[in-house]
Amino acid sequence: MLARFARRSPLSCFGSALLIATWCQAAGTLAAEQAPAQTAKPVLLLTGEDYPGHKWKETTPVLRSQLEKDTRLQIQVVEDLKFLRSPDLHKFAAIVMHFKNYDPAVPGPEGQENLARFVREGGGAVLVHFACGAFQEWPEFVNIAGRVWDPKLRGHDPYGVFRVDIIESNHPITRGLASFEVPDEMYTCLTGETPVTVLATAVSKVDQKTYPMAFTLTYGKGRIFHSPLGHDVKALGTSAVGKLFRRATAWAAGLQPMEVGGK
Ligand SMILES: [Zn+2]
C-alpha cells in the first residue's frame, strides 16, 4: 500500500492535504510495524513554480526517480507552495525544494515561518538549483539556504559540460564519491556569509574562479544540503548528480546514505 501511494501521480492542489495526512499516517504505521524506525522516511518533494526556463514538470519526475533509487526515501510530490503553511509539513523527515517562488503572498510569511520552524526543529532540507533564489524577499532565508541568489552577480557560465570536484570526502554524503562531469549551468551567483561546509566545487570557464557546487549547514536541529546543480532533465538525469542528491536527501532525513555504487 505504501509503495502504491509513493508512486501516485503528483498532488496538484492543497485540497489533497487529507490524502497527505492519510499517507503520512500509513507511512508511520507501516514503518513501525514492518521495519526498524530508521529504514523509511517520508520526504516531501515540493515544486510547482519556477523561472519559465526551468521545466519543473519535466525535471520533477527525473529528480523523483533519482531519489527513489534509495527505497527508504518515501517521496511525496506536492505542486503547490501553499503547502508550506500546512501543519502536515511537520510529518515529513525532509523537504526537497525544487522551486523558485515569485509571489511574495504565496506561501507568504506564514509559510516561510512554518518552513523555518520545520528545519529549526529537526527537519532536513535539500535545495536544488534555483531554490537558491526561492525567497528573494525573505532575509532569514540565507540562514537556511547558506548561500542565496544575488541577481547583481553574473548568473552562470553558458550551459555546457563541466567538472565537479569533490573536495570533502570525509562527509557522509560525499564519502566514496568521485569527481564527475555534468552538462549543466555552473552557477556563479551565490552570496552569503552563513557558515557552510563545502563538499564540491567547480572552476568557471569564463572567469577561472572556483565556485561551490554542493555544501551543507545546520539551522537549529535541521540538516541542510544545497547544490546549484540540476538545471534540466539532462543534468538531473546524470548518474553522479542523482547519486549526490540521493545521498544528500538520505542524510538530511537522518539516514546513513547508501553505499556508493550502482547507478
Ligand atoms: Zn537553470
Image (spheres, helix red, strand yellow):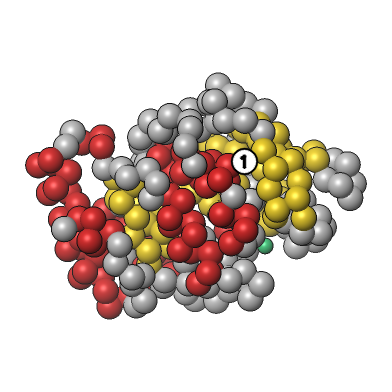
Q: Nearer the viewer, residue 240 or 55?
A: 240
Question: How far across and down, in percent of the image, does residue 126 sit?
Answer: 49, 48
Tell which of 118 and 202 is nearer to you: 202
Q: Quadrant for residue 179, please give it.
A: top right
Residue position marked by numbered label 1 in the rendering: 214
Q: Residue at x 20, y 36 (%)?
A: 37
Q: Is residue 85 visible?
A: no
Of residues 24 and 118, the one drawn nearer to the viewer in this rendering: 24
Which residue is at a point 48% across and 64% down the rendered structure image? Answer: 60
Q: Position of residue 217 (x, y in %)?
A: 54, 37
- Identity of the residue furthest to the right in this view: 207
Check disc 1 and give the amino acid type.
Answer: Ala
Where in the figure is residue 204, as x and y percent of width and height? 83, 45
Placement of 196 over or under 96, stated as above or below: above
Label 1, residues with CA under 10 Å away: few <14, some 14-19, many ≥20 = many
Q: Is 19 placed left or right of 114 in the picture?
A: left
Q: Is residue 199 visible?
A: yes
